[in-house]
Amino acid sequence: MLVFTADHIAKTFNRRKIFAEISFSLEKSDSLAITGRNGSGKSTLLKILANVLSPTKGEIEMKIDGKIVKPVDFFTHLGLVSPYLQLYDEFTGWENLDIFMKVRGINASDECLGELLKRVNLWERKNDYVRTYSSGMKQRLKYAFALIHKPPILLLDEPTSNLDAEGISTVYQIMEEQKKAGILIVATNDSEDIKKCEQAIDLNLQSNGGSKK
Amino acid sequence: MTLHLIARPLTIYFGKLLFNLILLGALNIFTVILYLLFVTGFTVGNYLIFSVTILLGTLGLASASTIIAAIIAKANTKGTLYPVLSFPILLPLLLTVINATKLSVEGAVFGDAVGEFQVLISYLVVITAISYLLFESIWKE
Ligand SMILES: Nc1ncnc2c1ncn2[C@@H]1O[C@H](COP(=O)(O)OP(=O)(O)O)[C@@H](O)[C@H]1O
Ligand SMILES: [Mg+2]
């Protein structure tokens, strides 16, 4: 059993109200699209859900098998793909994933890592430094980063940015699988992406996000 | 943000603390060796006081600078803030360590330096407790 609840979340940056009163409750095999114009707070909301940023008001609750997960442990149960994510340029794609795996304390085999890299089509370039990757390849590596621990909750910010047609179809496949296995939350304005989700929150309607109080 | 997604805040804190400890510890030992070898007229009267001072001083300096660095990493004016913020926080530590070193060089008995060590230990306890309580909110932007 898996429950992910947001209760009256609000965020204010330096007295600028971004959004307020965001509430939803998701269970296994639910999917949610977060839409809104640029600057409406989609990325901010995803960071709050991932416990990277604290909300000004409100609570987020994650429940797995009836047990409440502490916010400091959210990271073990969720994966995030975001333009704000920075992987280590000085390491190769393979080394990046290997380090993340070790820091997380999971013992995936080399085959597992290899399969992940093949899935996002980076296998041939696994021994190249990330700084030599194109933006699309970095985006692919972020998917490998987000999926390495098989998280029950997957958060995607602008999931298809920088990707080619083949990459986009891989992402849609990942989204479909996530909807079967757990919870999927996508921040996007792409109508194709929105169609993949059953529920939607429009941040434009939620508040006058971005305007001064 | 990557680190936020792969580890608990306290794990990150102890990682940074450990790095600072090793760096400062190595640096201090290196400096002591250089002093003993090359500074003429530098002799330590009481090695016990001297080594306890080095140990407590390194611990205090490393833990204070770890939390100060964490605070400053989140501020916008990084360059000038470190000396301004760290000086008052480090001042009691530095004064006590200088005093204790002086005692050790003069060859005082261990009992004379107990007061200094109590100050250093209290400083350590306070800084560690504050860091433990604050790091999560500093770290989470
Ligand atoms: N660290 C920050 N400090 C101040 N304002 C911020 C910060 N991060 C984001 N904002 C503001 O919050 C609003 C929402 O940003 P964001 O969540 O990135 O929007 P979106 O992803 O929907 O385009 C913007 O107006 C932006 O200027
Ligand atoms: Mg955004």
Image (cartoon, coloured by chain):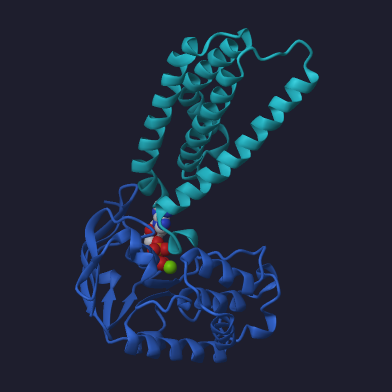
Chain colours: A blue, B cyan
Q: Write the residue at 60% across / 41% down.
A: B22
Instruction: State the residue in front, B3 or B50.
Output: B50
Instruction: Estimate the x, y position of residue A121 in percent, counting from the top left.
Output: 60, 86
Q: Is residue B6 above or below residue A160?
A: above
Count of labels shown? 0
Side (left or right) of B110 relative to B136: right
Instruction: Estimate the x, y position of residue B106 in percent, counting from the top left.
Output: 61, 7
Q: Write the residue at 48% across / 59% down.
A: B3
Side (left or right) of B119 relative to A58: right
Instruction: State the residue in front, B36 or A16.
Output: B36
- Ligand 2 shows up in which quadrant of the image? bottom left
Side (left or right) of A108 relative to A91: left
Would residue A180 be visible to someone looking at this image?
Answer: yes
Q: Write the residue at 39% across / 66% down.
A: A75
Instruction: Estimate the x, y position of residue B30 in percent, counting from the top left.
Output: 71, 32
Instruction: Estimate the x, y position of residue A133 in percent, counting from the top left.
Output: 66, 74
Q: Is residue A135 above or below residue B22?
A: below
Occupied quadrant, residue A6: bottom left
Side (left or right) of A59 relative to A120: left
Would residue A191 be visible to someone looking at this image?
Answer: no
Instruction: State the residue in front, B83 or A67.
Output: A67
